[in-house]
Structure formats: C-alpha cells, structure tokens
C-alpha cells in the first residue's frame, strides 16, 4: 500500500497555480487550487514563489471572490519572508 504524506506534489502544485491564474476558473476550482497549494511542500511546508505569485494575482484581481481571496491570503501566509530564506 502506498503512503500518503498529506502534501501536494510538484505537478499538482503547478496545475493548481495555473488554475489560480486562469481567469476562466470557477471560484470552486480556485478555492480547491489554493487549498492544494497550501499543502505543497517547500522548505518546511512553505508556499513557493510561483504559488505566492499566483495567490498575489488572485488578491489583486477585482473579479476574485471573497472566498478566492481568503484562500489566496492563506497561501501567502505560508510564504517565507526574505529573512527566512537567508
């Protein structure tokens, strides 16, 4: 039986980032994508730069719903600060 680490793999994380950047994605798709990205492993479970960029775009998009922005903010809250990466 295979093991489930509870983390999103790199291919799934890339697909999730693309979903967040796709203006044709539904709010449900974007919410699921943000959730997946929040579980993508980086160094110590932090959100990577590509995912953070997608989340920032979602926050700045006037068409994003409150739920989408909430999910994006959650992903960004797991982004390492510059001082954490030095």
Image (cartoon, helix red, strand yellow):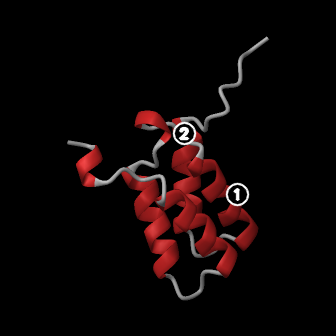
Q: Residues within 10 Å of mark 2 (few under 14, many from 20)?
A: few
Q: Residue at x 43, y 59 (%)?
A: 52
Which residue lies under the disc numbered 1? 32
Which residue lies under the disc numbered 2? 11
Number of the label disc, if any, that sits on residue 18? none
Q: Is residue 58 above or below residue 54?
A: below
- Give the SS element for disc 1: helix
Q: Is residue 79 left or right of residue 10?
A: left
Q: Nearer the viewer, residue 43 or 2?
A: 43
Q: Position of residue 54 (x, y in %)?
A: 47, 64
Q: Are marks 1 and 2 in contact (CB under 8 Å)?
A: no
Q: Position of residue 36 (x, y in %)?
A: 63, 49
Q: Is residue 39 left or right of residue 79?
A: right
Furthest toward the front, the residue is: 83
Total labels: the figure holds 2
Q: Position of residue 1 (x, y in %)?
A: 79, 11
Q: Position of residue 60 (x, y in %)?
A: 46, 81
Q: Is residue 5 above or below residue 34?
A: above
Furthest toward the top, the residue is: 1
The answer to which image quadrant residue 84 occupies is top left
Q: Is residue 1 above or below residue 74?
A: above
Foreground disc of the pair 1, 2:
1
Q: Nearer the viewer, residue 36 or 46?
A: 46
Q: Residues within 10 Å of mark 1 (few under 14, many from 20)?
A: some
Furthest toward the left, the residue is: 86
Quarter placement of the C terminus: top left
N-term-proximal mark, 1 vs 2: 2
The answer to which image quadrant residue 72 occupies is bottom right
Q: Nearer the viewer, residue 29 or 41?
A: 41
Q: Residue at x 60, y 38 (%)?
A: 8
């Amino acid at each position: 039986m295979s093991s489930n680490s509870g983390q999103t793999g790199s291919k799934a994380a890339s697909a999730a980032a693309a979903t967040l950047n796709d203006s044709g994605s539904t709010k449900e798709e974007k919410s699921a994508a943000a959730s997946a990205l929040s579980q993508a492993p980086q160094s110590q479970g932090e959100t990577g730069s590509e995912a953070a960029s997608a989340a920032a775009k979602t926050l700045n998009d006037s068409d994003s719903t409150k739920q989408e922005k909430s999910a994006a903010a959650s992903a960004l809250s797991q982004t390492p600060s510059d001082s954490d990466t030095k």
